[in-house]
Image: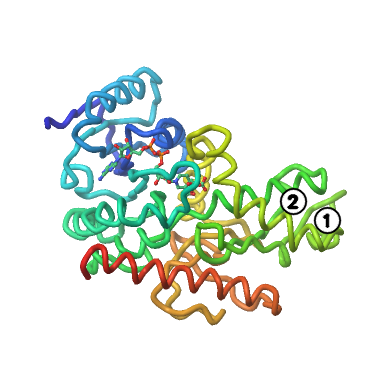
């Protein structure tokens, strides 16, 4: 299948090479516009997009490339659309690994493991061979944590810290729930944490979150003033939000997923504001929260200079401990099943 190569113009100065996989799919349809207009890397940073999808989707992808051209976006320098991992991953700075089968109604995300594990095995190997060693990778395709672990293991020449999975959508969902409960804009809610797996066992934790109300920083627990809600409906709403969107749309979240990918990568590249943290699925090695090593687990992280650091020292009570352990246990089971499928 021939690669499509569209050079819009060439600028002196360094363009960033950004790869999006699943580029003909529904998340990419929102994501590509935001990336190419500067929401992630800045309004003045030229971008070369490499778009990967499977061969049967090349005609659809051709239409996406035409639309990107028709958006007349000043920082979009070049687009390469291909079904060849080598062409898509060569010398890239950032990989947004979206392409995978989505779940349908009645499925859990881990039910996708068999269908999707091999994609991330192959793409991990190709990243290892062709991408820059500094490449930053965010895995979105489900089950996102375990797929990120597979890609990381298949790319031993790239530092483990460069692999992450998306739990920012869960964080954004949690933030919005709390903002709604307190009647404040979402910008007034900070430091909500998502622990663990991007699945229905995740633990959305507001115990250390802050709500800015009438110019004052309040603990979220005080601002919400409803412990039963924070320990009950708040958690289950966030845990089950993906399924609720599927039940309503008959398709999984796409616009909100694309927005979350942009938030995740923007903060990774540009840093988090002082005193604030965000959640990302990252390698659990060396964490101080008693989470077993060798998992891609969502932690609270601060980002600076393109690197993440887990926020240490948050108090963990018995309620939180139980939930953090449960989601770790599920991740260990997913990991074992995944490595059986891919024969490692
Ligand atoms: N982590 C998160 O927060 C979220 C994850 N997701 C997951 O993201 C994934 C993509 O979702 P959608 O865009 O809605 O799905 P979609 O079905 O609309 O698009 C997926 C695209 O990936 C392509 N694809 C399949 N195998 C590929 C391969 N080996 N290489 C490159 N491309 C390949 C397909 O041809 C298709 O164009 C799903 O696994 C979904 O469950 C969705 C929402 C949130
Ligand atoms: O629920 C799904 O399958 C898609 C997804 O990951 C989400 O919306 O969080």
Q: Is residue 325 above or below residue 67?
A: below
Identify the disc placed on residue 279: none
Judged left or right of residue 174, residue 58 is: left
**Earlier residue among tags 1 and 2:** 2
Q: Residue at x 12, y 30 (%)?
A: 2
Say few, some or many: other residues with alpha carbon within 10 Å of mark 2 (under 14 / 14 to 19 / 20 or more). Answer: many
Residue 86 appears left or right of 165: left
CB contact under 8 Å: marks 1 and 2 = yes
Q: Which residue is mark 1?
A: 224
* Quadrant position of the N terminus in the picture: top left
Q: Quadrant of residue 219?
A: bottom right
Disc 1 residue: CB within 8 Å of ligand 2: no
Residue in the picture at 42% in, 77% down? 285
* Image coordinates for residue 131, horizontal then vertical, percent: 23, 54
Residue on which disc 2 sits: 178
| CA distance separating discs 1 and 2 | 7 Å
Secondary structure at badge 1 equals helix
| Front position in the image: 127 or 270 | 127
The quarter in which the C terminus is drawn is bottom left
Where is residue 192 shown, x and y percent of the image?
Answer: 66, 59
**Beta carbon of the mark 2 residue lies under 8 A of ligand 2:** no
Relative height, residue 271 to residue 4 (above, below) = below
Name the quadrant containing residue 30.
top left
How far across and down, in percent of the image, does residue 51 sit? 28, 37
185 left or right, relative to 14: right
SS type, badge 2: helix
């Amino acid at each position: 299948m021939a690669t499509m190569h569209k050079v819009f113009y060439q600028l002196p100065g360094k363009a960033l090479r950004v790869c999006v996989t699943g580029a003909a799919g529904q998340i990419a349809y929102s994501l590509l516009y935001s990336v190419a207009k500067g929401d992630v890397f800045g309004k003045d940073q030229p971008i070369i997009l490499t778009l990967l999808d499977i061969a049967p989707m090349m005609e659809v992808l051709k239409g996406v490339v035409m639309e990107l051209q028709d958006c007349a976006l000043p920082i979009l320098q070049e687009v390469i659309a291909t079904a060849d991992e080598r062409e898509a991953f060569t010398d890239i700075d950032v990989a947004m690994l979206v392409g995978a089968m989505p779940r349908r109604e009645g499925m859990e995300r881990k039910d996708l493991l068999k269908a999707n594990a091999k994609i991330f095995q192959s793409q991990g190997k190709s990243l290892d061979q062709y991408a820059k060693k500094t490449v930053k990778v965010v895995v979105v395709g489900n089950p996102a944590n375990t797929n990120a672990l597979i890609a990381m293991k298949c790319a031993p020449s790239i530092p483990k810290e460069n692999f992450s999975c998306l739990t920012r959508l869960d964080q954004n969902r949690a933030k919005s729930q709390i903002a709604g409960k307190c009647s404040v804009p979402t910008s007034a809610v900070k430091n909500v944490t998502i622990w663990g797996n991007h699945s229905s066992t995740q633990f959305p934790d507001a115990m250390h979150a802050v709500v800015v109300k009438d110019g004052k920083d309040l603990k979220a627990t005080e601002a919400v003033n409803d412990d039963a809600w924070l320990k009950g409906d708040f958690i289950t709403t966030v845990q089950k939000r993906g399924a609720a969107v599927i039940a309503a749309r008959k398709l999984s979240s796409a616009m909100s997923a694309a927005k979350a990918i942009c938030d995740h990568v923007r903060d990774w590249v540009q840093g988090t504001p002082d005193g604030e943290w965000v959640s990302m699925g990252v390698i659990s090695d060396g964490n101080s929260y008693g989470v077993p090593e060798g998992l891609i687990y969502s932690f609270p992280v601060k980002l600076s200079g393109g690197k993440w650091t887990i926020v240490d020292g948050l108090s963990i009570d018995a309620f939180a401990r139980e939930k953090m352990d449960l989601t770790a246990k599920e991740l260990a089971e997913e990991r074992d099943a995944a490595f059986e499928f891919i024969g490692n």
